[in-house]
Amino acid sequence: MPGIYIHIPFCKQACHYCDFHFSTVLKSKGDLSSPGSILQTIYFGGGTPSLLSGDEIKNILTVIRKNFTVEDKAEITLEANPDDLTREKLESLRLGGVNRLSIGIQSFDDEDLKWMNRAHSAAQAIESVKLSQEAGFDNITIDLIYGTPLLTDEQWKINFSTAFDLNVQHLSCYALTVEPRTALAHAIAKKNQAGVEDGKQAKHFGILMEMAARNGFEQYEISNFARGGLYSKHNSSYWLGEKYLGVGPSSHSFNGESRQWNIRNNNEYIRIINEGKIPAETEILTEQNKFNEYVMVSLRTMWGCDLEKISKDYGTDVAETFFRQAKKKIETGLMIQQNQNFILSEKGKFFADRIAADFFVV
Ligand code: SF4
């Protein structure tokens, strides 16, 4: 199993757009540390993993090392919010074994950050990257969100340039989505908030692709950009269909044949684990599920869909149907063929989900 994902389900405050599983009640934070294969990646996601102390992270890593062999050069990523990254915290994270930081900056504009209900300012965001670099982190990714109502085209360009000037190795950039049952969805429903404009999001995505290419960032996945080949090994293994184990409330696992979801409730998760059971539901994937997932995920990457793999894993009939449909997409300029691989063109990247759905076996 190449990777392990640890979900830390706590946050200081709730961002208005967020649909992840987290609790702002931190009192059970210490009760969630819990337990082979060789691991190439370890990923602390959330929630807000940087709410844990360096010692708490170190304890979790010690438990992982007791139960698995961890490769010497394993990528160990921790998602962090700028307001948590003090000099001391960074030092303890580095000594604890973390070697890659994913900083949830989202915007370098204070108005935009306030609108999202983020807990940090633009100045703190910049400072957090500089402090991380001073502490010795040389593999840093930052998250940015575009298409928010207050974000002008000009500010979006400034956000990108600021990230570029900070010399980060990797960017994850997402269009704002309105998830049901979030504060943002309620505000839009009550007409207290403008909805998301598709045209603006598409424009920001275009600006992003153009600026990324101009500044030497490779778009290796539709929302992910890397310099110097520093792709996220952990996320790439998801996209390449490798196995992973998810630990913590709401995390997912995949073993090649089935997918498993842990429950999204911290207290219940702890109670069931303490009874020696696994608090999860499992779905066995059909061949159809696997093919659709393969197309949906790989089409978003620069490696695209591999016709030989489709033929080998799903049969020649499925491969022939795929090839016929792909040819039509190529004729309309939405896809490109590179040897046996079919990838999205620049134009196609604007419609990735819709294009993938056209290939689904139903
Ligand atoms: S976006 Fe991140 S910090 Fe904000 S509520 Fe969601 S998980 Fe917590």
Image (cartoon, grey):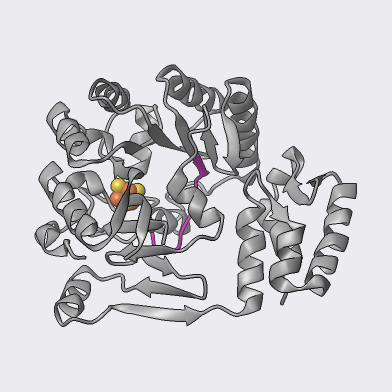
Residue 303 visible (yes or no): yes
**Residue at the far top in the pictured view:** 165
Residue drawn 65% across and 43% down?
302
For the residue pair 248 and 230, the one nearer the viewer reads as 230
Residue 204 lies in quadrant: top right
User: Relative to residue 8, is residue 253 drawn left or right?
Assistant: right
Measured along the vertical axis of the image, is residue 69 above or below residue 161? Answer: below
Within the magenta stretch, is there residue 175?
A: yes
The quadrant holding residue 311 is: bottom right
**In percent of the image, x 46 and y 54: which residue is there?**
188
Q: Is residue 58 above or below residue 207?
A: below
Image location (x, y in percent) of residue 198: 63, 46
Which residue appears at 51% of the width and 43% of the height? Answer: 174
Q: Main secondary structure of the magenta part?
A: loop
Q: Which residues are magenta?
A: 173-183
Along the line of sight, the residue nearer the viewer: 215 or 258: 258
Residue 315 is inside the magenta segment: no
Res 177 seen here: no
Residue 168 location in percent, x, y? Answer: 42, 26
Residue 1 drawn at (x, y percent): 41, 62
Horizontal relation, residue 334 to residue 278: left or right: right
- Residue 160 vertical placement versus 188 (above, below): above
Question: Which part of the image, by quadrant, shows the C terminus?
Answer: bottom right
250 relative to 202 in the view: left or right? left
Report the front residue among 238 and 10.
238
Residue 110: name its quadrant: top left
> Where is residue 138 shown, x and y percent of the image?
35, 27
